[in-house]
Image (spheres, rainbow, N blue to C red):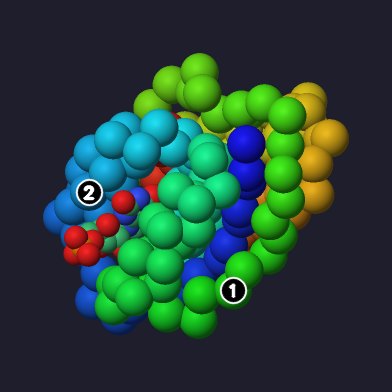
Amino acid sequence: MYQLNYHSISSKGLVLKDLNDILDEAIAFNASKNISGCLIYHNDNFVQILEGEKKDVLEVYERIKKDNRHHSITLLWENKVNKRHFEEWNMAYYNPNEKNMKLFITNFLLLSSLSDRNSGTLLSFWSSVRKILEDGSSHLGVNKL
Ligand SMILES: Cc1cc2nc3c(=O)[nH]c(=O)nc-3n(C[C@H](O)[C@H](O)[C@H](O)COP(=O)(O)O)c2cc1C
């Protein structure tokens, strides 16, 4: 089992439909390759963690890097792991008002503090998530892949 975590910036003019399209493509392809993970979108930042067989994770990452809906793609961490960490995640899509957003971010950061931290990729994923969530609050999506 392999995990990979990257950060990127969304391209200018990205709209909700683009995010939904990205998610539809990701869910369909990842399911076919048995890849799980989580994609966070907040304030023009994407952070994604992918896990699966190494060759599949690297293949999907190559596809993602070519996508012109984001840029400045930076690989943050990759390593082998013994088990999946994101298999059971429930999908949430978030476009909340300010009040709910604050609560959501608080809960999500709490989740991050409780999460299993036994791989470098997990550590780097959660620390990137904290960084982008603590940096203002507008539109956020969190999705199981
Ligand atoms: C931030 C971001 C995350 C993405 N995550 C995935 C993913 O996890 N799996 C996936 O198959 N495609 C993902 N995509 C979409 C791929 O980049 C690509 O558009 C899609 O796989 C279709 O590729 P194709 O046009 O070569 O068939 C993502 C795109 C972006 C911008």
In the rendered image, which residue does mark 1 sit on? 74
Q: Considering depth in this image, is 54 or 114 the residue closer to the camera?
A: 54
Specify whether tag 2 is near ligand 1 (CB below 8 Å): yes
Quadrant assignment for the N terminus: top right
**Picture quadrant of residue 143:** top left
Q: Considering depth in this image, is 127 or 52 the residue closer to the camera?
A: 52
Whether residue 130 is visible, yes or no, is no
| Left or right: 44, with 120 as reference point | left
Which amino acid is tagged 2? Glu
Q: Considering depth in this image, is 137 or 15 the residue closer to the camera?
A: 15
Spot occupied by residue 125 in the image (x, y as percentages of width and height): 67, 50
In the rendered image, which residue does mark 2 sit on? 25
Spot occupied by residue 98 in the image (x, y as percentages of width and height): 45, 44
| Left or right: 100, with 125 as reference point | left
Give the mark nearer the N terminus: 1 vs 2.
2
Spot occupied by residue 78 in the image (x, y as percentages of width and height): 68, 56
